[in-house]
Image (spheres, rainbow, N blue to C red):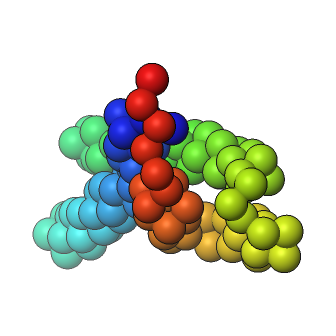
Amino acid sequence: MTKNKKVLLGILSFLPFIFFIVYMSTFLSFMFEMVRHEEFSDGGSEFPAEFTSNIIGIVVSAIIMGLLSLGVLVFFIIHAINNPIVKSDERIIWILLFIFLGMVVFPIYWYMKIWKQPTVEA
């Protein structure tokens, strides 16, 4: 694998975690705005229009995070199955880690099994 592909895979392995941070910060910001609005509101039951942009941000970041996580999950499972460097018993452990820990394990696998392997120039 060339160095450019390794770098691209590294970026893709960290992106779901970055979008998770964006999602959580947007969600917490929305929650704090809701609490603040409830404290200073006059008791009206109408939904403020400025919250719509926060909800859209939450939904968009969740969708991007989910699609990226799914794509990277499928790629790394296939890579772990086809990688001759990964032993058969280790392969099962990696696949289970991918399934249950997902975005936390992606950068670890990328570093240990892709980045540290010898680079093949095209």
Expressed as whole percent of the image width and height from the top left, the position of residue 21 reads 33, 62
Judging depth in this view, the residue of 81 and 116 nearest the camera is: 116
Judging depth in this view, the residue of 25 and 1 nearest the camera is: 1
Which residue sits at x=65%, y=51%? Answer: 76
Quarter residue 34 falls in: bottom left
Quadrant in which the C terminus appears: top left
Judging depth in this view, the residue of 80 and 3 nearest the camera is: 3
Which residue sits at x=76%, y=74%? Answer: 90
Whether 48 is drawn above or below 110: the answer is: above
Residue 70 seen from this side:
no
Whether 55 is drawn above or below 85: the answer is: above
Which residue sits at x=49%, y=56%? Answer: 117
Expressed as whole percent of the image width and height from the top left, the position of residue 116 reads 44, 61
Which residue sits at x=42%, y=31%? Answer: 121
Q: Is residue 60 left or right of residue 49?
A: right
Residue 26 seen from this side:
yes
Judging depth in this view, the residue of 72 and 31 nearest the camera is: 72
Expressed as whole percent of the image width and height from the top left, the position of residue 67 reads 57, 40
Q: Which residue is the extreme one toward the top?
A: 122
How many numbered marks appear? 0
Whether 90 is drawn above or below 64: the answer is: below
Q: Is residue 55 left or right of residue 70?
A: left
